[in-house]
Image (cartoon, helix red, strand yellow):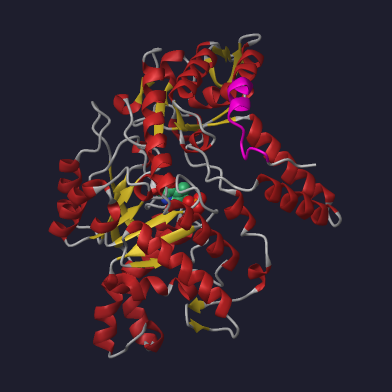
Amino acid sequence: MTHQPFDAAAASAAYNNALQVIASVEPTIAGAIKAELADQRSSLKLIASENYASPATLLTMGNWLSDKYAEGTVGHRFYAGCQNVDTVEQTAADHARELFGAPHAYVQPHSGIDANLVAFWAILAQRIESPTLAEAGAKHVNDLSDEDWIKLRKALGDQKMLGMSLDAGGHLTHGFRPNISGKMFNQHSYGTDPETGLLDYDEVARKAREFKPLILIAGYSAYPRKVDFAKMREIADEVGATLMVDMAHFAGLVAGKVFTGDFDPVPHAHVTTTTTHKSLRGPRGGMVLCQPEYADAVDRGCPMVLGGPLSQTMAAKAVALAEARQPSFQTYAQAVADNAVTLAEGLMKRGVKLVTDGTENHLVLLDVSSYGITGRQAESALLDAGIVTNRNAVPRDPNGAWYTSGVRIGTPALTTRGFGADEFDRVAELIVDVLSSTTPTTTAAGAPSKAKYVLAEGVADKTRAASAEILDKHPLYPGLELS
Ligand SMILES: *Cc1c(COP(=O)(O)O)cnc(C)c1O
């Protein structure tokens, strides 16, 4: 299932003219933009967090909306003359609420990380600030005296968050050290069952009872299964936690009604955050959806952690969300999930070990250790052969987060190109060819290297030729020609 049909002649003219204008100022950049399209067209893009936005979405980002400051919210701006940005933001928020059935949508975050920061501060404000404010007789944090601020800072400190561990597929922004969330929160994590690799809800409940987090966070970037958000909400309610779901990776499956009922996070979570550029296939950006009681706090994202919104990106979010509200997007999302199953089966029947032995979403996590190589070697060898993936730790990974033992692959991008079951089975075959033709080199000490490898002669060329054949049958942006 490809993009909605677009006028290829109009899109070609738009891009050729734009590139001509850019080249007249800085030809290097016009060249890099052209080269990026060529690269994207000619590689098998299996990165689970990437996609191809539609020409309409992409074209919406390059214009004078970018030149407007619009801090604040619709109808309540700190700058004059925001009537067009109001139209843009209102349209994007309306589409988001309708698409996800959410009571409130905040479409200003510039990225997934920003969306999470907005959500964290909104939850802290809602849960911690109010009692402190009431005690101090203040309405808003700005009204607090210095003395009350000290009290508030103490109340904010050492708040607890419980989220999925990194090596089970959680995300850096869910309380891990290299990210500000890991400094803001006292974080504990839940993992997956060592036997099945599946999320163990009893363990989550046990840890939640013990740890009593303010925020229970669910969502992942490398877990290949559905999550039961109704169960997560029950656990959160039992311990008085706010349930925050970060659906950055799988928002497209929610939008496309592949994840419904207990597996749709939006009705169960107090606050849901997402990116808009992964399976949702929109512009690079973020978004927060929430229940009414968190709406005011979420809308203070600017100025709490954001400055002026990227109005051109909010406009592109509106376009992409309008596309996602079409029935064709549901067909696309279902194809993403079906293709992931085909890919998983294609790999397993050829002997590849997958974390959880399968998939229920858009991604598959390969454990490549049986090939005697690390994730890093697999990633590099696959890239040599024109297959773009990323290495990823597997649960309890003996090679750590840098070398890893895993490779994460996903179906959203190639499904946008129109790949179906036959193509994904062939992709599985090509991946296995490369993995089984890759051997680590030996270090001076006689041990296998974790980084260096040899890909058997001819395999890269053969694989590139085989992928070119499939890619040619499913052109990216058919009819779009750059001169
Ligand atoms: C990708 C991702 C993010 C971060 O998104 P950016 O736009 O790169 O900041 C946050 N959370 C999860 C779960 C993700 O997968």
Is 237 above or below relative to 228?
below
Residue 151, quarter of picture: bottom left
Query: Residue 215: image x %, image y %?
Result: 27, 59
The residue located at (62%, 59%) in the rendering is 61
Is 395 above or below relative to 307?
above
Taking depth in this image into account, of 112 and 184 the one nearest to the observer is: 112
The answer to whether residue 388 of the structure is visible from this angle is yes
Residue 56 located left or right of residue 172? right
Query: Residue 460: image x %, image y %?
Result: 63, 16
Residue 287, quarter of picture: bottom left
Query: Residue 201: image x %, image y %?
Result: 18, 42
The residue located at (50%, 61%) in the rendering is 318
The residue located at (80%, 55%) in the rendering is 22
The answer to whether residue 106 of the structure is visible from this angle is no
The residue located at (26%, 47%) in the rendering is 260
Quarter of the figure with the C terminus: top right
Query: Residue 407: image x %, image y %?
Result: 46, 28
Taking depth in this image into account, of 27 and 246 the one nearest to the observer is: 27
The segment highlighted magenta reads 467-479
455 magenta-colored = no
